Amino acid sequence: MARIKWFSLLLILILTACAEVEVHTYDDAFKSEGGPYVRDFAASAEDLYAAASRAVLGNNFRIEKEDAGRRNFVAAKYTTDGDKTVVLAVSVYVKDEGNGKSIAFTSAVQTVNKTRITYSYFYLPLIALISIQTPIRSGSTATTTKEEEKTVDNPDFYSRLFKSIDNELLKWDCYCW
């Protein structure tokens, strides 16, 4: 009888450990009024769009995709750390609210890619089916795999981005007479 209880307990523990934990990212969707990802500006949509693009370009990003007519772009910054490449992609969309006001919507994704290089070596045939590997490389193959990808949800990051856009708007106002 005791064996059956222990076996049942062990079986329950194993089945519980094997159970999949579901992560519902949609549980938090649409519960806030934009949060740190949205900011209102007292500037026209054209000026805000220009300031946003200058802000990201001035921080060593490059614009990967742009639709100036719809006032949105995706900018990316690439950094390397050994065999890893970290890509930070920032998406900005500017919406005109009229009366010299506009809204900037932003999101950012960080991706970590790892590059692995495999080398092939020259083989020296000795007799019929026997050959030996030499230290001479005959070629290499590089493969890149995505190690991690996550949405940047740090409010401080978006605060710095919007501050940079604010600074660009102030510079723009100073140079326009």
Image (spheres, grey):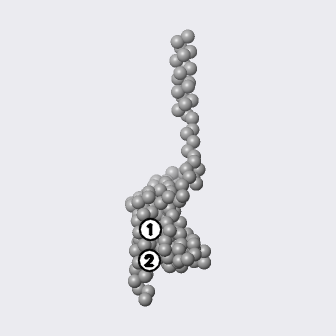
Along the line of sight, which residue is nearer the eye, 122 or 74?
Answer: 74
Q: Where 18 sits versus 126, above or below? A: above
Give amino acid for label 2. Answer: Leu
Q: Earlier in the sequence, mark 1 or mark 2?
A: 1
Report which residue position mark 1 lands on. Answer: 162
Give amino acid for label 1. Answer: Phe
Residue shown at 41% from the left, 71% from the top: 164
Residue 61 locus on image (x, y percent) = 45, 71
Confirm whether residue 160 shows in the render. Answer: yes
Q: Residue furthest right?
A: 69
Q: Quadrant of the C terminus?
A: bottom left
Numbered disc 2: secondary structure: helix
Report which residue position mark 2 lands on. Answer: 169
Residue 41 locus on image (x, y percent) = 49, 71
Along the line of sight, which residue is nearer the eye, 29 or 77?
Answer: 29
Along the line of sight, which residue is nearer the eye, 92 or 119?
Answer: 92
